[in-house]
Structures are given as C-alpha cells and as structure tokens.
Amino acid sequence: QVQLVDSGGGLVKPGGSLRLSCAASGFTFSDYYMTWIRQAPGKGLEWISYISTSGRAIYYADSVRGRFTISRDNAKNSLYLQMNSLRAEDTAVYYCARFRYGGTFYFDFWGQGTLVTVSS
Amino acid sequence: QSALTQPASVSGSPGQSITISCTGTSSDVGGYNYVSWYQQHPGKAPKLIIYDVSQRLSGASNRFSGSKSGNTASLTISGLQAEDEADYYCSSYTSSSTFVLFGGGTKLTVL
C-alpha cells in the first residue's frame, strides 16, 4: 500500500535552516509528481511547492519562493524540502503528498506530517 | 489570492445529510473541474475523499458526493455517522500564480 513518511522537523531559531524528508513506498515513486503542504497550528492548509517526476519542473508558493527548495531522489524514493531563512510564520506541520497532475488535479496520499517550530 | 470560502462550521444528526459549500471565482472553482475535498480528523493528516469535482477514490464511501454549480462546489455527506465528525477542506487549481487554493476549512459536528 502507498505509504509516505515525513521526518526532519524540529525547533529552529528564526533565520535558521532545516531539511525535511519524505520516504515513499508502495508505488513507483518516479512516476508521480510530489508536493509539500503545510498547516500552521489551528489553521488551514497551505500549498508550498511541487516537483515533477524528473525534478525538472518545480513551482513554489510566493510565501516560500527564494527561501525553500524542493528536490527528490528517485533512486532513494525520497522527497526533500530544504528550508532556509526560517521565520516564525513558517511554524507548521509539513506534509508531503503525492500529486496527481495532468488532466486531473489532487493530492491522493499524504504523509503523517512533521512539525516545524520556528522560535527563539 | 484569497482562499476559497467555506462555512466555518456545519452540524447534523446521525442519519441526516449535510452539504458544505466552497466558493471561488471563474479563475479557479468555476473555470476548471479540478476541485477536491479532504477530510481531516484531529491530529491526523488530511485524507482525500472527492477529486475532480465529483469523483470518489476507489473504495471510498458512497455516502460522500461532490458537485459544482458556477463558482461554488459542494460536498454532500448522506447518512451522517459519528465518525464523519472532522474538518473538511476544499481545494482547487487556480490559473493565477498561486497555482493551488485551499478553503479555510469547515468543522462538521455530528450531534
């Protein structure tokens, strides 16, 4: 069965960096777009970024463009999010999700989430 | 661009039907059949229940259905059960640079 396991969250000071990982199993990872979505405590969902199957097509939300970098390693069935210049407003649970895109548009499987707290 | 508009809360009794609305614009909900709905229980990850306006994921309960009229999409849950109590989010593709919009979420209470 499809499984996504998020990891790498933690407490970081403003201006600091963190790298999130998402380990995928139960499907052919290299055949699917992937995405990161976050949820601030007690708030709604916010889409962050997507990456194409090869990694050649990448897109970011304005709120993170220039600070966050999405990447993937198809040989390791893994998705990553490098987060730099972190701000208090980046505090959230971060979810990786499989992204169905191209004649359709939805996020069909999600990781369990990893909590990132930005605080001094 | 603003999030899609959902009611903050809805409620219903077991066995009843409820509908949650999701209002956008012609640049998102109204312009494309790319609306999806997600159910989130407290402390859990969101779970897809409806995609492309009205398609149910294979194996999903047929008590959930989706529709769209103009710039408003709707999720209907029939035969309400206690386990349906959760937060529900709609999402849509948008032709703006924002690319993806989510609704603010609707808390469903089963009385």
Image (cartoon, coloured by chain):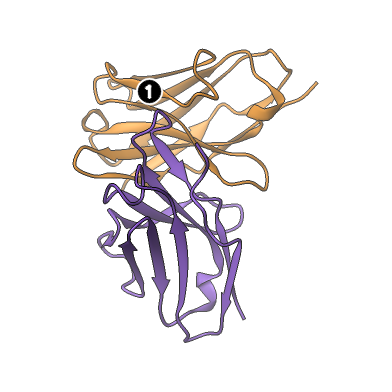
Chain colours: A orange, B purple
Residue at x-position 50% and y-position 23%: A62
Left or right of A35 on screen, residue B16: right
List the single residue furthest toward the right: A120
Element carrying mark 1: strand
Q: Above or below — where is A10 with respect to A18? A: below
Q: Count of labels shown? A: 1
Q: Amino acid at mark 1?
A: Tyr
Instruction: Find residue B43 and report its horizontal and vertical position in percent.
Output: 61, 52
Q: Above or below — where is B7 with respect to A25? A: below
Instruction: Find residue A3 and report its horizontal and vertical position in percent.
Output: 37, 43
Residue A111, quarter of the rendered image: top left
Q: Chain of mark 1?
A: A
Question: Of B66 and B110, which appears nearest the observer?
Answer: B66
Q: Above or below — where is B106 with respect to A55? A: below
Question: Of B78 and B32, which appears nearest the observer?
Answer: B32
Residue at x-position 29% and y-position 31%: A33
Q: Above or below — where is B88 with respect to B103? A: below
Instruction: Find residue B14 and report its horizontal and vertical position in percent.
Output: 52, 85
Residue at x-position 23% and y-position 44%: A104
Q: Quadrant of the C terminus of chain B?
A: bottom right
**Circle 1 sits on which residue?**
A59
Left or right of A35 on screen, residue A41: right
**Label 1 Cα neighbours within 10 Å, binned few <14 / some 14-19 / many ≥20:** some
Residue A5, quarter of the rendered image: top left
Instruction: Find residue A69 and report its horizontal and vertical position in percent.
Output: 46, 16
Left or right of A107 on screen, residue A21: right
Question: Of A61 and B1, which appears nearest the observer?
Answer: B1
